[in-house]
Image (tube, helix red, strand yellow):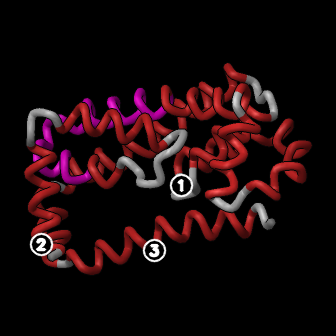
Amino acid sequence: MLRRLYDWAMGLAAGRHAPAALGAVSFAESSLFPIPPDVMLIPMVLANRKAWWRLALLCTVASVLGALVGYGIGALLFETLGRPILAFYGAEHSFERIVGWYAQWGWLGVLAGAITPLPYKVLTIFSGSVGFSIPLFIAVSIVGRALRFFLVAGLIYWIGEPIREFIEKRLGLMFALFIVLLVGGFVLLRVILPG
């Protein structure tokens, strides 16, 4: 089953609508969607290694635009939309405790969420709800997201065919690692922001 899913993802990654789908996932992941764009970015770079920097740039731009939507949810729709999203990710009870910290150190939270498996959308909503500086939010988001996506795409480009062979021989392990990182990001957020 994993082999069929992998082959499907590789076929999709090489398709003509793949960049639009990657942009949509990158955009949505920054404010609502739980699956990171790396799931599409990696097979797309494997399918077309020469496009690595364009794909990383697409992820970065779409993700930062999506982060502004998350910021807007926090700033304008916190009670109606933001609070339920935070509740879904288990972070609603931590909100009051981190407001003071976030005013001074929020850029570190945004940067950590932009680079690591931490749920970035939670931090974009927090930023808007506390009125975090928009120029600083945008700057840190650009740096963090670019660092993440260019690093991932660049490594796939640089390593090339050996990484494809490694992934294809160890699909089960790669899938398990992805799940661990995804769940680990949510668990880490629960530890950092206990309810």
The reply to whether the C-beta atoms of the residues labelled 3 and 1 are less than 8 Å apart is: no
Label whose residue precedes the other's in the sequence (1 or 2): 2
Question: Residue 189: x percent and y percent?
Answer: 67, 62
Label whose residue precedes the other's in the sequence (3 or 1): 1
10 Å neighbourhood of mark 2: few (<14), some, or many (≥20)? few
The image quadrant of residue 105 is: top right
Q: Quadrant of the C terminus?
A: bottom right
Amino acid carrying mark 1 in the image: Thr
Which residue is disc 1 drawn over?
A: 116
**Residue at mark 1 to residue at mark 2: CA–CA distance:** 27 Å
- In this view of the protein, which residue sits in the foreground, 86 or 10? 86
**Residue at mark 3 to residue at mark 2: CA–CA distance:** 19 Å
The label on residue 103 is none
Tell me the SS state at disc 1. Answer: loop
Amino acid carrying mark 2 in the image: Arg
Answer with left or right where residue 112 lies relative to residue 104: left
Nearer mark to the viewer, of 1 and 2: 2
Label whose residue precedes the other's in the sequence (3 or 2): 2
Which residue is disc 2 drawn over?
A: 3
Q: Which secondary structure type mostly characterizes the magenta part of the structure?
A: helix
Region in magenta: 42-64
Residue at coordinates 69% horizontally, 56% vertically from top-left? 87
10 Å neighbourhood of mark 3: few (<14), some, or many (≥20)? some
Residue at coordinates 31% horizontally, 55% vertically from top-left? 39
The image quadrant of residue 126 is: top right
The image quadrant of residue 67 is: top right
Residue at coordinates 81% horizontally, 56% vertically from top-left? 94
Q: Quadrant of the N terminus?
A: bottom left
